[in-house]
């Protein structure tokens, strides 16, 4: 848990000033998420370097990519890409036809990454005071 919480804080703190609000992943209850079995970590060099939170949505035929974060000191090493590829494989193995996600409009770097990986915008909405972009990737 300490490694997960450190990564979340380090990966999202800089967005607070940009969007004027605390990003949702910083407010999540990670002990509960871990207990639910939806948090998966990437370990390299003996340390947790990143994590991904995947929530099954069987009624929608999708897997919700609720959060992905890589330690800032480990960014640029391909860990984010590896986590996304792993999520896609897990979704296919689980019989899901797509992965859904949402991100904030101000997280332009993330939007660019998802677009390069084949995610397409489905709609935009304001939720809990945050301007969000919803995306999906058919599998």
Image (cartoon, grey):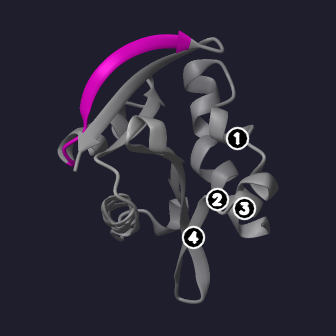
- Whether residue 53 is in magenta: the answer is no
Image coords of residue 19 (percent x, y): 57, 20
What residue does disc 1 label? 26
- Is residue 23 in view? yes
Depth check: 55 or 66 in front?
55
74 displayed left or right of 37: left
Residue 48, image quadrant: bottom right
The stretch in magenta equals 117-126
Query: Mark 3 = which residue?
Result: 34
Mark 3 / mark 2, whichever is N-terminal? 2
Q: Say whether marks 1 and 3 touch (CB < 8 Å).
A: no
Tell me the crowding category of disc 1: few under 14, some 14 to 19, or many 20 or more residues within 10 angstroms, Cα based.
Answer: some
Front of the two marks 3 and 2: 3
Residue 136, given in percent of the width and then of the height, sits at 30, 36
| Camera-nearest label, 1 or 4 | 4
User: For the residues marked 2 and 1, what is the alpha-carbon distance in whole angstroms?
Assistant: 10 Å
Can you identify the residue that label 2 sits on?
Answer: 7
Circle nearer the viewer, 4 or 3? 3
Precedes in sequence: disc 2 or disc 1: 2
Q: At x 33% / y 31%, what residue is drawn?
A: 135
User: Residue 112 vs residue 27: left or right?
Assistant: left
Res. 105 visible in picture: no
Whole-percent x and y of residue 92?
A: 30, 61
Check disc 2 and report its element: helix, strand or loop: helix
Which quadrant of the rendered structure holds the N terminus? bottom right
Crowd rating for badge 2 (residues with CA inside 10 Å; few <14, some 14–19, many 20+): many
Residue indicated by mark 4: 41
């Amino acid at each position: 848990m300490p490694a997960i919480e450190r990564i979340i804080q380090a990966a999202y703190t800089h967005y607070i000033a940009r969007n004027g609000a605390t990003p949702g992943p910083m407010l999540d209850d990670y002990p509960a998420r871990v207990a639910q079995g939806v948090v998966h970590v990437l370990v390299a060099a003996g340390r947790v370097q990143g994590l991904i939170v995947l929530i099954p949505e069987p009624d929608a035929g999708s897997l919700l990519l609720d959060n992905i974060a890589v330690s800032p000191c480990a960014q640029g090493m391909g860990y984010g890409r590896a986590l996304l590829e792993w999520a896609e494989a897990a979704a296919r193995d689980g019989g899901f036809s797509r992965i859904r996600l949402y991100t904030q409009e101000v997280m332009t770097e993330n939007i660019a990454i998802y677009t390069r990986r084949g995610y397409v915008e489905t709609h935009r909405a304001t939720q809990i005071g945050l301007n969000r972009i919803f995306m999906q990737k058919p599998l």
